Image: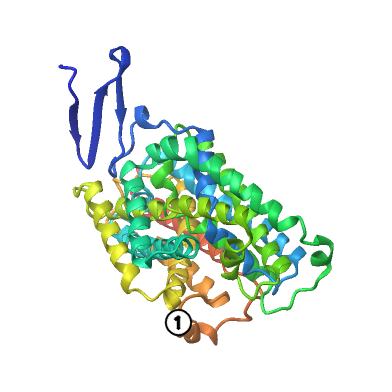
Amino acid sequence: MPRATRLRSHPSNLIRVMPAKGGAIRERAPAWGISPVPDRLRTLGGLENGMLWSSLGLSLLVLVAGAFLVPGLSLPQALLAILVGGIFGNALLGFAAAIGAEAGVPAMVLLRAPLGRAGSYLPTGLNVLQNLGWTIFEVLVIATAARALVHGPLWAWKLAAAAAATILALVGPIGFVREWVKRVALWVVLASLAYLTWWALHDAHLGALWSRPGKGGLSFWQGVDLMVAMPVSWLPLAADYTRFSRSGRGAFWGAAVGYFLPNVWLYALGAILLLSRGLADAPSVISAIATGGIGAALALVALGVDETKEPFANVYSAAVSLQNVLPRVPQRLLILAVAGIATAGTFVVNLVHYQDFLYLLGSFFVPLFGVLLAQWLAGNRDAFGAPEIRPAQIAAWLAGFCLYQWLAPVGPASWVHLVDHTHPGRGAIGGSLPSFALAFVLSVALTLAGRSTARRDRPSCA
């Protein structure tokens, strides 16, 4: 075979094989499709997984989310809610990452095993909508922050942010980690956040803040749900990246610990910033940093540039999710299509109410993962040999969703008003843990019942 580059085709995959120094052959798969990733291409170790998820956790939106916990909760209550929600949410993320590493397939393909091939199309559609929505929201946040710091037309910053996210999505997760995160992004962002942490704490009077009571309007368990929401939002995306991992253990600890540390850090920092600076609302945190001096402004610039990784992840996962339904369409074409739709959306979508719709979609994914984990533990792991549909498992998932909405309605105001009169007491207990538990238990119970019935109906050998 000549030393020129060769292309080797495989259903839904494109592998580029090229000569390396010394005649060795090196393979890369930036656009690997829905079939299991072979061992030779599973190159991400535990440290690299940790760096990937730490980078994804270092986000301006996480900082702003932490500010929503106060002053409704006192600072001690907010920090405890951050810890409890962080442990639960990141444990779920770790399990999702480990399952993806063991199976070697994207997240939406994994759902064929518990829900059936056609049954996986519903969460696929929801996940594509969610990823498009978050891409639009992230691009708008980046463009708004850039205009506040550097000025210029907003439309130009929208196009620049969308273009950066598209380029990263075309590079793929392995290239993203090794060329961007490992070499540049993680270290610049860590330095920026270290400065912002000092800037927030050096005159914060923590003793006074610690003893200040909460104003109410937010219960402890609602605070836990708010913390859980961030790692849980990655559950339907995790396997898209960890399928390139060398081991399930490395993927679990890399994702769980890697995302937990910046998650807790930034949620706590956001809460302290709002209290110490006497801000009126959570979005004011960004403005306070922008006007906090040259050091804070430079840190915000670094965070704004790095924020492009968030829409990258959403564009990439939306394209990979679509391959669950359209496996023969090239991944790069789907990336360009998703990026184009999201970019257009930044000019026409009103995000005042759209974010509420995204939260409604997100409430589907906690109980959905309960079903996936239950079926994985029960041994139903064959994504490509699954039946067309498994209605019992879909029912377990939707029962968990209904319980979530009954306990803690989230979504647009019209939806919340529709279900509001049915819940037993807003904030009495959050929706995340109970909905996960119900879906998990129902999934296991229905599986055991089905196996018992099958054994009873099996013809006797006597």
Residue 433 seen by the camera: no
Q: Nearer the viewer, residue 31 or 417?
A: 31
Residue 13 seen by the camera: yes
Q: Is residue 400 above or below residue 218?
A: above
Q: Is residue 97 above or below residue 61?
A: above
Residue named by callout 1:
415
Q: Nearer the viewer, residue 94 or 330?
A: 330
Kind of residue at disc 1? Trp
Q: Nearer the viewer, residue 416 or 175?
A: 175
Q: Position of residue 286 (x, y in %)?
A: 57, 64
> Does residue 333 appear to the left or right of 254 in the view shown?
left
The image quarter containing residue 457 is: bottom left
- Density class for disc 1 (Cα within 10 Å; few <14, some 14-19, many ≥20) is some
Q: Residue at x 36, y 52 (%)?
A: 165
* Image label count: 1
Q: Which secondary structure, mark 1?
A: helix
The image quarter containing residue 287 is: bottom right
Q: Position of residue 256 (x, y in %)?
A: 57, 46
- Image quarter where the N terminus lies is top left
Residue placed furthest toward the top: 22
